[in-house]
């Protein structure tokens, strides 16, 4: 079994107004063809039925498609412009005490041996609108088809936060999920870094002991993450951070004028 748990932390750094945050978390890394068996054999975890921690299909990519694997593979294939084969895994939060919120979920397509990723897809959920946006990226680079790291730079395409406008360039760096998972997201405006987010996790096997520890250590994880977003939004406003309306709402106002 290749599925596992990752424990670690998330850090955010904003330069102006200066604002840093850090919180501990854990994230299951589950291969989709193992997910049902993996969760259902543990008492307090379950697949598609209520429990303290559970996987609900409706919480993830294209919920109207019955199979998450088919939905993810279809989007990856469409965005890559060629068929995406091999097993698929997800690094995410599960529904916790009936509630699920994922600021970002990562999907990986792997080679047949489940050693090397071939495609990565990040699906972002914005706050407070709870819209989803998925972007698939090739893992391989021009120099090394077996790279442990993939890096991508592109213009912002999706309104994620009301405290960051659309005139932003992204610089994303991903380390292959192994003993550690590391993701760095750098945001630049006019070639100057003004915000960064970092995910640093360490791998642990899925055992009854580690699952029990995750429940004891993070009993209301998704509720805490969601509440923390709104708390930090309030702090940013009190610090005088600029507020940017959702582009679609701004467009509606212009059309009504």
Image (tube, helix red, strand yellow):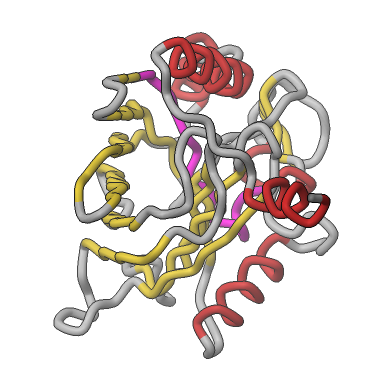
**Left or right position of 186 against 72:** left
Q: Residue at x 34, y 71 (%)?
A: 139
Q: Is residue 34 above or below residue 67?
A: above
Q: Residue furthest left?
A: 143
Q: Is residue 143 above or below residue 235?
A: below
- Judge by depth and name the residue closer to the eye, 20 or 164: 164
Q: Residue furthest bottom?
A: 82
**Left or right position of 82 against 43:** left
Q: Is residue 23 magenta?
A: yes
Q: Which residues make up the magenta segment?
A: 22-36
Report the number of numbered marks.
0
The quarter of the picture where residue 114 lies is bottom left
Q: Position of residue 41 (x, y in %)?
A: 66, 35
Look at the magenta stretch and give its main secondary structure.
Answer: strand
- Judge by depth and name the residue closer to the eye, 152 or 69: 152
Q: Position of residue 231 (x, y in %)?
A: 53, 13
Q: Residue at x 79, y 55 (%)?
A: 63
**Left or right position of 31 against 43:** left
Report whether residue 1 is seen: no
Q: Is residue 202 magenta?
A: no
The quarter of the picture where residue 74 lies is bottom right
**Left or right position of 125 against 204:** right
- Judge by depth and name the residue closer to the eye, 180 or 40: 180
Q: Residue at x 38, y 75 (%)?
A: 138
């Amino acid at each position: 079994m290749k599925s596992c748990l990752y424990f670690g932390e998330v850090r955010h750094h904003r330069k102006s107004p200066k604002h840093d945050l850090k919180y501990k978390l854990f994230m299951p890394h589950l291969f989709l063809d193992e997910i049902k068996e993996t969760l259902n054999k543990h008492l307090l975890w379950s697949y598609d039925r209520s429990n303290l921690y559970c996987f609900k299909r409706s919480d993830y990519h294209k919920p109207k498609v019955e199979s998450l694997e088919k939905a993810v593979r279809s989007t990856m294939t469409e965005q890559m412009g060629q068929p995406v084969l091999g097993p698929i895994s997800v690094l995410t939060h599960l529904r916790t005490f009936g509630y699920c919120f994922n600021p970002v979920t990562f999907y990986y397509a792997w080679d047949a041996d489940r050693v090397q990723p071939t495609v990565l897809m990040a699906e972002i959920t914005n706050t407070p609108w709870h819209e989803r946006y998925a972007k698939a990226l090739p893992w391989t680079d021009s120099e090394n088809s077996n790279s442990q790291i993939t890096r991508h730079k592109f213009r912002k395409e999706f309104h994620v936060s009301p405290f960051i406008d659309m005139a932003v360039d992204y610089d994303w760096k991903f380390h292959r999920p192994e003993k550690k998972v590391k993701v760095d997201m750098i945001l630049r405006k006019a070639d100057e870094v003004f915000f960064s987010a970092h995910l640093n996790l360490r791998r642990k096997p899925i055992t009854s002991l580690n699952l029990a520890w995750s429940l004891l250590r993070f009993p209301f994880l998704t509720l805490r993450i969601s509440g923390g977003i709104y708390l930090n939004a309030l702090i940013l406003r009190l610090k005088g951070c600029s507020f940017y309306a959702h582009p679609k709402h701004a467009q509606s106002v212009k059309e009504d004028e």
